[in-house]
Image: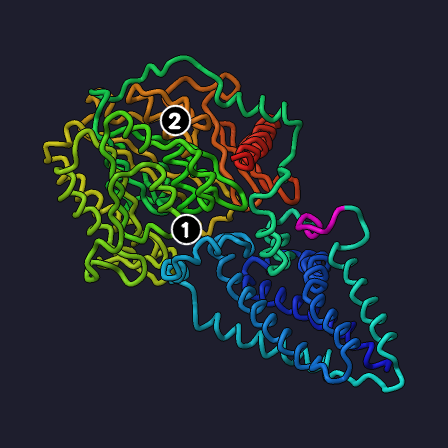
């Protein structure tokens, strides 16, 4: 009888040990970051992480403990041990797969696995392509090892289920089972305190990696699913009135934009979004020389913006920021909710209302990450995507190579009714960096492959622009070149670092006035500021784009030189001429400062995070 009633505590200990084992896999896989931590901090990863591990364990035990109660009522014919083993095996495999997927995703994204990958389930081929550079064989071997160790733990810690002695009544056994079930509430909540356990309870270090490592992945996935689109606003840093006032300072009227870049108010607009073009590889932004010779040469004959920052870190987030001027969300993306995106402004819709014809080109599948619903709502009249290209012109993962995409555009643009607003989104510089050209930068590392893919896209872009400049439509065309987001390579830049978010923005084309060619704009701004900047040059109102400000107008009085807000998973950064400050929303403390940012700069970031997410919740 004693062994029978020790089974449930042993089962609890098994899951707790399994989660600790999974955590050990994480710190070992990321040993280059782990070994940089003091020994006490490494120990803290396991010690502080126990609260979330215990919470996840309690949830794992709920169903088996309930089965114990059912078995006590049903009698010995109930197949309790088989049911518990089946349940444990199924969940053990799921937890193992989440654990192993998280190992590599953390390397690429810089945050623990949450609900983000679920955005891509409708397009499994693209989801697989995103992981194309992952060491699949190694990860499968690690999964097998983790599952074998988990089975070993189960046999040693849990073992077979002892029978209930005949003299022990069903009623007493049922009460004992109910008591164990009720006790699970305490670890589920992380204790008896008023507020249930959350990520902040395991954040203990000033090193973001250590805090991330302490998080329990299955708990994090389920919690992020539960928190999506939910209220109240989790980013309540300041009184609402204060947050609104501080945010509005960034968009305060400063007088008319007196900078006129264009020779006409109704040019064609060719809006080209460059996949993952980080400023770290753009020479005229202070990055590596020789990787983007096209962009660097265009900075001498076009208009370059030197301090533009991506609003977020994923393609679908960049689209919304660039085309709708709308801020990103730190743990989700508004593009997942068509009901919300229907309420957003859009450049295509505005320009179509002004008589522009519209078209959208992409070599991949538009259904990826729910982008097509957003683009259809935006009002594009014609779409060209992966299915419209021959198989021979596609790479092994994503779709049509960039040179194929641009060649098709060059062929079709003369037939596009003027004035036109045509958007193109490249893809060859996305993982796994499969490009059809000889290697320019030697090496097999991820950074070398990424450099080669960026060089390829830059090269074919140069060819496209040279040929386009000889077309009749070129003289009345403004070309906007901007990245969708940055990249952690080269240098494996931390997820929060400003270098990961700084991206190029260039204006070129025959519609530019000769006098403005070669101009450099130093104002700090975000992708969200592109729509207002463009519309004001076209002498069109940008009032619908309330989160967008004109980068060519005088800077706000409170922020001379401008300011750029960006967010990453559960954190944000604010960049100004004074420097950059980054902040962890969960730990509620700064991550790092560069330069000499002021206290007001951090308060601006808190206010912006709070008000922008409140706006998202209301849509």
Residue 178 falls left or right of residue 215: right
At numbered mark 1, what does the secondary structure look like: helix, strand or loop? helix
Residue 204 falls left or right of residue 267: right
Image quadrant in which you'd find residue 73: bottom right
Residue that mark 1 sits on:
369
Residue 136 falls left or right of residue 83: left
Residue at 71% from the left image edge and 59% from the top image edge? 55
On whether residue 160 falls in the magenta region, the answer is: no
Q: Residue furthest top?
A: 255
- Tell me the mark number nearer the camera, choosing from 2 and 1: 1
Residues in magenta, as a range: 195-202
Q: Residues within 10 Å of mark 2 (few under 14, many from 20)?
A: some
Residue 39 visible in the picture: no
Residue 216 visible in the picture: yes
Q: Residues within 10 Å of mark 1 (few under 14, many from 20)?
A: many
Residue 205 position in % (x across, y down): 67, 49
Q: Nearer the viewer, residue 4 or 103?
A: 4
Residue 441 position in % (x across, y down): 29, 56
Residue 313 falls left or right of residue 442: right
Mark earlier in primary sequence (2, 1)? 1
Identify whether 258 is placed above or below 445: above
Residue at 18% from the left image edge and 39% from the top image edge? 465
Residue that mark 2 sits on:
522
Q: Nearer the viewer, residue 66 or 436?
A: 66
């Amino acid at each position: 009888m004693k062994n029978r009633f020790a089974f449930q505590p042993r089962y609890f200990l098994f899951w707790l040990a399994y989660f600790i084992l999974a955590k050990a896999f994480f710190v070992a896989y990321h040993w280059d970051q782990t070994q940089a931590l003091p020994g006490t901090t490494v120990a803290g990863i396991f010690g502080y992480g126990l609260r979330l591990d215990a919470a996840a364990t309690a949830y794992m035990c709920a169903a088996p403990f309930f089965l114990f109660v059912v078995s006590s009522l049903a009698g010995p014919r109930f197949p309790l041990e088989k049911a518990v083993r089946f349940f444990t095996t199924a969940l053990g495999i799921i937890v193992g797969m989440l654990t192993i997927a998280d190992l590599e995703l953390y390397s690429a994204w810089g945050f623990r696995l949450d609900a983000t990958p679920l955005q891509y389930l409708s397009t499994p081929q693209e989801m697989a392509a995103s992981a194309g550079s992952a060491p699949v064989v190694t990860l499968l071997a690690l999964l097998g090892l983790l599952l074998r160790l988990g089975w070993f733990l189960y046999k040693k810690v849990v073992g077979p289920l002892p029978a209930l002695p005949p003299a022990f009544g069903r009623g007493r056994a049922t009460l004992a089972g109910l008591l164990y079930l009720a006790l699970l509430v305490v670890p589920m909540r992380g204790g008896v305190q008023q507020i249930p356990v959350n990520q902040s309870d395991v954040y203990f270090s000033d090193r973001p990696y250590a805090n991330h490592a302490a998080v329990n992945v299955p708990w994090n996935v389920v919690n992020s699913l539960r928190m999506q689109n939910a209220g109240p606003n989790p980013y309540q840093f300041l009184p609402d009135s204060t947050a609104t006032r501080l945010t509005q300072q960034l968009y305060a009227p400063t007088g008319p934009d007196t900078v006129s870049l264009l020779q006409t108010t109704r040019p064609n607009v060719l809006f080209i979004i460059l996949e993952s073009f980080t400023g770290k590889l753009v020479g005229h932004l202070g990055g590596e020389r020789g990787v983007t010779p096209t962009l660097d040469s265009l900075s001498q004959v076009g208009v370059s913006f030197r301090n533009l920052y991506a609003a977020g870190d994923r393609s679908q987030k960049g689209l919304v920021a660039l085309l709708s001027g709308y801020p990103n969300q730190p743990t989700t993306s508004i593009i997942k909710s068509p009901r919300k995106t229907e309420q957003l402004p859009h450049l295509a819709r505005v320009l179509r209302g002004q008589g522009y014809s519209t078209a959208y080109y992409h070599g991949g599948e538009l259904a990826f990450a729910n982008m097509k619903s957003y683009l259809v709502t935006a009002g594009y009249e014609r779409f060209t995507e992966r299915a419209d290209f021959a198989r021979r012109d596609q790479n092994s993962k994503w779709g049509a190579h960039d040179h194929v995409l641009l060649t098709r555009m060059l062929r079709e643009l003369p037939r596009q009714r003027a004035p036109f607003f045509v958007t193109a989104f490249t893809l060859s510089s996305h993982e796994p960096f499969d490009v059809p050209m000889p290697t320019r930068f030697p090496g097999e590392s991820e950074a070398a492959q990424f450099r080669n893919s960026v060089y390829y896209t830059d090269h074919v872009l140069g060819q496209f622009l040279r040929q386009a400049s000889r077309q009749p439509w070129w003289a009345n065309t403004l070309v906007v070149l901007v990245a969708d987001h940055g990249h952690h390579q080269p240098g494996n830049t931390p997820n929060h670092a400003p270098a990961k978010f700084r991206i190029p923005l260039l204006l070129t084309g025959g519609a530019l006035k000769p006098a403005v060619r070669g101009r450099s704009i130093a104002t700090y701004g975000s992708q969200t500021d592109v729509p207002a900047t463009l519309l004001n040059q076209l002498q069109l109102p940008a009032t619908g784009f309330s989160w967008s400000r004109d980068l060519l107008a005088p800077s706000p009085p409170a922020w001379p030189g401008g300011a750029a807000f960006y967010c990453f998973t559960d954190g944000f950064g604010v960049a100004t001429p004074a420097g950059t400050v980054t902040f962890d929303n969960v730990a509620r403390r700064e991550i790092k400062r560069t330069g000499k940012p002021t206290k007001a700069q951090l308060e601006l970031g808190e206010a912006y995070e709070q008000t922008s997410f409140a706006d998202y919740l209301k849509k």
